Amino acid sequence: MLIIGIAGGTGSGKTTVVNQIIEELKNEEVDVISQDSYYQDTSHLTYEERTKINFDHPKSIDFDLLVSHLKDLKDGKTIEQPVYSFKEHNRTGETVITEPKKVIIVEGILILTHTDIRDMFDIKIYVHADSDERLIRRLKRDINDRGRDLDEVLWRYQTTLKPMHQQFIEPTKEFADIIIPTNRYNTVAVDIVQTIIKERLA
Ligand SMILES: Nc1ncnc2c1ncn2[C@@H]1O[C@H](COP(=O)(O)OP(=O)(O)O)[C@@H](O)[C@H]1O
Ligand SMILES: Nc1ccn([C@@H]2O[C@H](COP(=O)(O)O)[C@@H](O)[C@H]2O)c(=O)n1
């Protein structure tokens, strides 16, 4: 089993890169695990309280569950990946049955901050886009897809997202084996990663 970690700031293009990488792989060969599925269960809080959570701090992630799920997959066991709702700021209570495959791609802003998880990765990738580009993408995406408005995105950017990015996320670039610049669509980098995966699978 090959485990690939793909980190990078919000809006850097992690999900897009993952989708491009797996385009040529068969479904039965690859699992994608998103760190977003592992936001802490906050059902004990009201909706109002949940809106104020700092979702860019490592403490917002249930890393224990993520570690145990990755270990299970490595051991050939099936897991139940939680489903997360950005509209509700909480897990939905549903799960996705995920079976072990030849390639596991784990993507998320904070995945390289955690030593045990970092050590499980065979390849560590950091996706980089400039912060203004990321903010523009985040604004468009959160308003179109995640039920947010301009004020909410800018408030979150100023209060938590930008400082947490500088404190926790950007420094993990030093752990990366490969850094992919994505201010433009980077097909060359995607081709290189696809080639590495194919070689390892051969
Ligand atoms: N290289 C790129 N150039 C322009 N837009 C991009 C690029 N990569 C991603 N996007 C767009 O930016 C938004 C955020 O990308 P996404 O892959 O979801 O980022 P992340 O998973 O890192 O938050 C999406 O709307 C996506 O279509
Ligand atoms: N309820 C939530 C949970 C997380 N976020 C933001 O999502 C970002 C991480 O996801 P990406 O797909 O962009 O990598 C992170 O920056 C959190 O601020 C949120 O807005 N609401």
Image (spheres, rainbow, N blue to C red):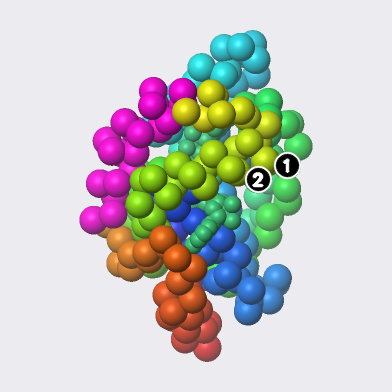
The residues colored magenta run 155-174
Circle 2: is it few (<14), some (14-19), or many (20+) Cα within 10 Å? Answer: some
Q: Name the residue under label 2.
A: 81
Q: Which of marks 2 and 1 is nearer the N terminus?
A: 2
- The foreground one among 74 and 190 is 190
Looking at the picture, how far across and down is residue 183, in whole percent?
41, 61
Looking at the picture, how far across and down is residue 40, in whole percent?
54, 29
Residue 172 belongs to magenta span:
yes
User: Which amino acid lies under the numbered mark 1 shown in the image of this protein?
Assistant: Thr
Q: Is residue 10 left or right of residue 79?
A: left
Please indicate, yes or no, whether residue 67 appears anywhere in the rendered image.
Answer: no
Looking at the picture, how far across and down is residue 109, in whole percent?
43, 45
Please give the name of the residue rendered at 38% of the width and 66% of the height, measured from the top-left corner: 180
User: Which amino acid lies under the numbered mark 2 shown in the image of this protein?
Assistant: Gln
- Whether the residue carrying mark 1 lies under 8 Å from ligand 2 is answered with no
Q: SS class of the residue under badge 1?
A: strand
> Mark 2 and 1 residues: CB-CB less than 8 Å, in contact?
yes
Q: SS class of the residue under badge 2?
A: strand
Provide the major secondary structure of the magenta segment. helix
Please give the name of the residue rendered at 52% of the width and 84% of the height, measured from the top-left corner: 198
Q: Is residue 34 left or right of residue 184?
A: right
Please give the name of the residue rendered at 65% of the width and 15% of the height, measured from the top-left corner: 47
Q: Name the residue under label 1.
A: 95
- The foreground one among 153 and 164 is 153
- The foreground one among 192 and 121 is 192
- Estimate the spatial distance between the alpha carbons at disc 2 and disc 1, rounded to whole Å: 5 Å
Residue 80 belongs to magenta span:
no
Above or below: residue 6 compared with residue 199 = above
